[in-house]
Image (cartoon, grey):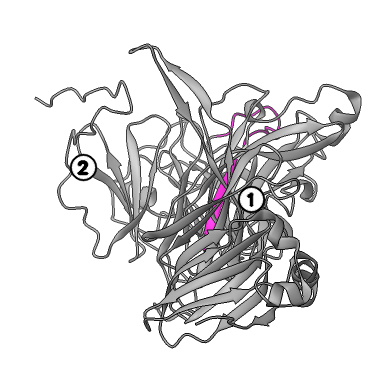
Amino acid sequence: EKPNPAKVTALTTPAKVTSTFGKSGHKLPVTKMAFHESGIFFATGSVDGLVKVWDVRHGYATHALYPTVSSGSGGRGRYAVTCLSWRSNATCLILAIGREDGSVSIHDLLLHAGDTKKASLPLAVMRDHVSAVTCVAWSEGGGTGGGRRRKHGGGVFFSSGRDSVINTWSISEEEVEIVPDAGKGPKRKKKKASKDDDGAGGGRAEVSVRVTYCRIRTLPVYEQVESMILLSRRFRPVSETKDQQEVLDKKDIVLSTCGTKGVVRLWKASHTGSDGPLVVSELSLLASQSEKEAFGEDNGGYTSLHLTSLSTTHWSPLLVVVDAEHNMTYLRMGWKGSTLVFSTDRSIVGHNGEILDLSVVPKGDKLVEEGDKHTVAVATNSSQVRLFGLSEAKEEENEENNDVQCHTALSPRGMLDGHTAIVLSIDASPCGRYLATAGKDKTMRLWHIESQKCIGVATGHTEAVGSVALSRKIGCYDVGGKAAENGAGSFAVTSSKDRTLKVWPLPGSAVMNRYSEEGDISLRARLS
């Protein structure tokens, strides 16, 4: 008798293994997993292209779904499973499998439940993508074909991949009568013809369902799509005014995508007919992340997109997007007049290695983003320096212990890229306008924080520069000319593994601000 699984009542409750299935049967690593809405079945996909469907209650595999070989491939190809998705309906078992060769296989495990061979064969195989398929989604609805109840289900199917396109497919089905051929198969004893027998003397006709996925639209998005989500009505902002309803109708289909360009975008498609198979218009851009808040293509782009279930109201749907640096950003969708916009709710920041140094930039008039209390510069085990905005602390009360906890969140604000080796030390000026960095590339760099550009480079050390510091008098940063060269202005101090300490005079804010637009200058040491 299996023990009842322990319920997780709090985040501090340790996770426990409730059951083990033993060997998976996959020859190569399992990379994808998807649970059915009923909670009874789940599917696993591996690099070898095999997909297995498992029964959670009894712990055994019910189906083994192998990749189909396209004509002309010679039995060889890239069949690694890149995405798995169940149709969102607890009463059907329809599974879509996307693979690295650009194919999408649709399996309906209930349509031929009585025939084991037919149940394991794909219902439809689409090979319109030329690269790996990353996401698929179904949109429910559509015509019913003369009032007849569909066995497979109608609607629209969407697929996206690394070939930078989103394909729209129309789903249609028809009943086909299959009459067995009397000349084939094993011989049977003849029996008297009855009224129910066909006049031709053949066997009784068998009714089969033929399901067709027909591509009706192709949208080029000019980026490799890494994740795509279909937003149901309860996760969309409500259109209250007439202008908002013209932009987004409750019957529209809404998709959210992200990819290598590092921008989250919303797309919509409208219904163009009510009778017969569902037909939708071309996908059009509904909303896009602003360039200021987007992660960007230069930083590696986004890797995945998720819809949080914490918010089930119309007023505050949240999307969680993960970027290439393992940061999670919570995005809120809302109306600004008659325009749908994204706003960053909070971010969870992660790092790939050690945090070697950090510096809190003093708050200036134009340097801190709206809603941020401070800007923090962090040097990780990398040649790049990352800037984060630190928001105000939020108090949350714990009902169990009656304790009040304060939470703050870091939001990515940019990256300083210029060093050719790991950055070891950071220091911010007291005025909050400049940042000094030093590292293993034997140089010290001076940065203009507002423009995030390098304005000065100090070379002269023969070993790694392990520490850097900026002078602490605010008024000295405005001193320039001969006075600054003679030591009356601001300066930076560096110490290196070569056992030397150097003092570098800074030319003054007027010159440094000018070089933030023109380029960096070469600093000279006044004392070594």
Above-or-below relation of 465 to 279: below
Question: 189 or 498: nearer the eye?
Answer: 498
| Amino acid beneath label 2 | Tyr
Where is mark 1, residue-wise?
A: 257
Relative placement, left or right, of 352 versus 503 is left
Q: Secondary structure at mark 1?
A: strand
Q: Main secondary structure of the magenta part?
A: loop
Q: Which residue is nearer to you in this view: 465 or 178?
A: 465
Identify the magenta region: 131-150
Depth check, mark 1 against mark 2: the one in front is 1
Does residue 389 appear anywhere in the picture?
yes
Disc 1 residue type (three-letter): Thr
Residue at 39% in and 29% down: 38
* Quadrant location of the N terminus in the rendered image: top left
56 in relation to 85, above or below: above
Estimate the x, y position of residue 96 in percent, counting from the top left: 48, 50
